[in-house]
């Protein structure tokens, strides 16, 4: 299965980081019709052909996405959208 793995460092305080993470998931869930479930600082999401989780750490965000083989052609646009959203809300720390 194709995967997307993103690890980003951030410098936001915990409250602002959590708010930004909620905005990322809200935007991505609307854009890709994802069903999401938060558990503390981790959110799981899925839809047919896509599943994954995002963990919000004190200074980093870990995002893992698994795509079905049918979704392989969309890997690059999905990864680009995720990175753009993370840049917008957490700042480009690359």
Image (spheres, rainbow, N blue to C red):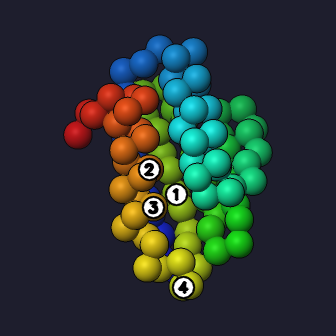
Q: Which residue is the site of mark 4?
A: 69
Q: Secondary structure at mark 4?
A: helix
Q: Please name the residue shown 41% across and 39% down the image.
A: 86
Q: Secondary structure at mark 3?
A: helix
69 displayed left or right of 39: left
- Disc 3 residue crowd, few under 14, some 14–19, many 20+, Cα 10 Å: some
Q: Position of residue 7 (x, y in %)?
A: 39, 47
Q: Please name the residue shown 53% across and 78% down the image.
A: 71
Return the mark for residue 79: none
58 displayed left or right of 49: left
* Quadrant assignment for the C terminus: top left
Q: Earlier in the sequence, mark 4 or mark 1?
A: 1
Foreground mark, 2 or 1, reads 2
Q: Is residue 30 visible?
A: yes
Real-space Cα separation, disc 2 to disc 1, in angstroms: 11 Å
- State yes or no: discs 3 and 1 in contact (Cβ < 8 Å): no
Q: Position of residue 47 (x, y in %)?
A: 71, 65
Real-space Cα separation, disc 2 to disc 4, in angstroms: 19 Å
Q: Earlier in the sequence, mark 3 or mark 4?
A: 4
Q: Which residue is the site of mark 3?
A: 78
């Amino acid at each position: 299965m194709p995967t997307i793995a993103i690890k980003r460092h951030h410098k936001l305080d915990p409250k602002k980081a959590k708010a930004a993470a909620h905005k990322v998931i809200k935007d991505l869930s609307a854009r890709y019709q994802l069903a999401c479930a938060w558990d503390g600082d981790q959110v799981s999401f899925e839809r047919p052909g896509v599943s994954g989780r995002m963990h919000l750490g004190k200074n980093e965000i870990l995002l893992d996405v698994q795509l079905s083989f049918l979704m392989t052609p969309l890997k690059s646009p999905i990864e680009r959208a995720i990175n753009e959203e993370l840049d917008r809300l957490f700042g480009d720390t690359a």
